[in-house]
Amino acid sequence: MMNTSKFAELKPVGPENYEIAWQLIYDTNPYLFEYFFNNDKDLLKFCLSDWWQRPQGWFSHTACTGATYENTLVGIEIGFSGSEFRKNIRPMLDYAQQTMKPAAFHHFSIAFRNYVPYLFPFIPRDAYYIQSLASVAEIRGQGIGELLLNNAFKSASENGLKSCQLDVASDSVAVNFYKQMGMEVIAITRVPYLEKNYGISMHYRMRKDLE
C-alpha cells in the first residue's frame, strides 16, 4: 500500500473545503453527531459545513491543519489549547442558534448542556486538545493520521504546552492508532442514558505528555 503521507502537504485550509471537511468531522464520532442533530443528516451536514466556514468555533477551518494530496484535502486536525477551547464554546452555540430552527436548537442545547459534558473531562489550560482528527476513507491507513498527529505533538510542544489530549469513543478503531502513537487512556467515561437511547458508548480521554 502506498504511503500517501510521503506526498501530502500540511498547511492551513480555507472555508472552501467545507464539502470534504464536514464529512471528516462527522466521521470522528458519528453516533454523537447524530444525537446532537436528532438524526437529521441534512441539518447535520448543513451546520457542520456552515460552522467550518465561520471564523471561530470548535469546527472552524481557522483552527485546522489540513493534509492535502494532489491539491485535494485528504485529512484534518482541528485543535486548541485548553484556554482557547473554552473561548470557542460561545461562538459555536451562537452559530447553532443562528442556523437551527427553534425545536432543533432546543434539542441541541439540551444535549450539549445536560448530557454530553459528562463524557468529556476537564481540559487543562496547558494542554493541547484535539477536537477532530480524520482522513478520507479511501486512504486511511496510509500515514495521513500519523502525519497530522505528529505535527500536532510538535506544534503543541513548541508552543509550551505540556500534553496533547483528546476524547474518543471506546469502540472506535482509532483507539489502537492513538495507543501506537504513544497516547494512553487516563479516564473512562460513560453516560447510561446516551448509551441506552443513542448507542453512544463509553469514551476514553487519552493523553500524551510532551517534552
Image (cartoon, rainbow, N blue to C red):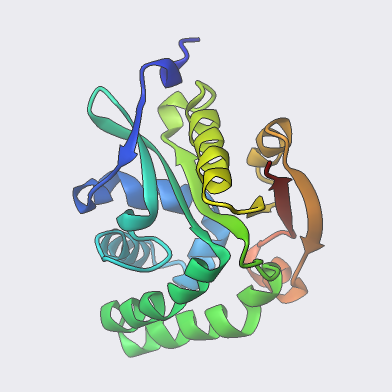
Q: Position of residue 40 (x, y in %)?
A: 39, 67
The residue most toward the left is 16
* Residue 105 versus residue 152 in the image, above or below: below
In this picture, residue 50 sits left or right of residue 139: left
Please state the total of marks drawn on the protein image. Answer: 0
- Nearest the eye: 95 or 36: 95
Quarter residue 173 falls in: top right
* Residue 139 versus residue 117 in the image, above or below: above
At horizontal 60% and vertical 54% (from top left) the residue drawn is 161
In this picture, residue 65 sits left or right of residue 20: right
- Nearest the eye: 210 or 1: 210
- Nearest the eye: 25 or 158: 158
Quadrant (top left/top right/bottom left/bottom right) for the C terminus: top right
At horizontal 54% and vertical 86% (from top left) the residue drawn is 110
At horizontal 71% and vertical 50% (from top left) the residue drawn is 207
Q: Position of residue 179 (x, y in %)?
A: 73, 36
The residue most toward the top is 1
Q: Position of residue 203 (x, y in %)?
A: 72, 58
Q: Position of residue 70 (x, y in %)?
A: 25, 22
Quarter residue 11 falls in: top left
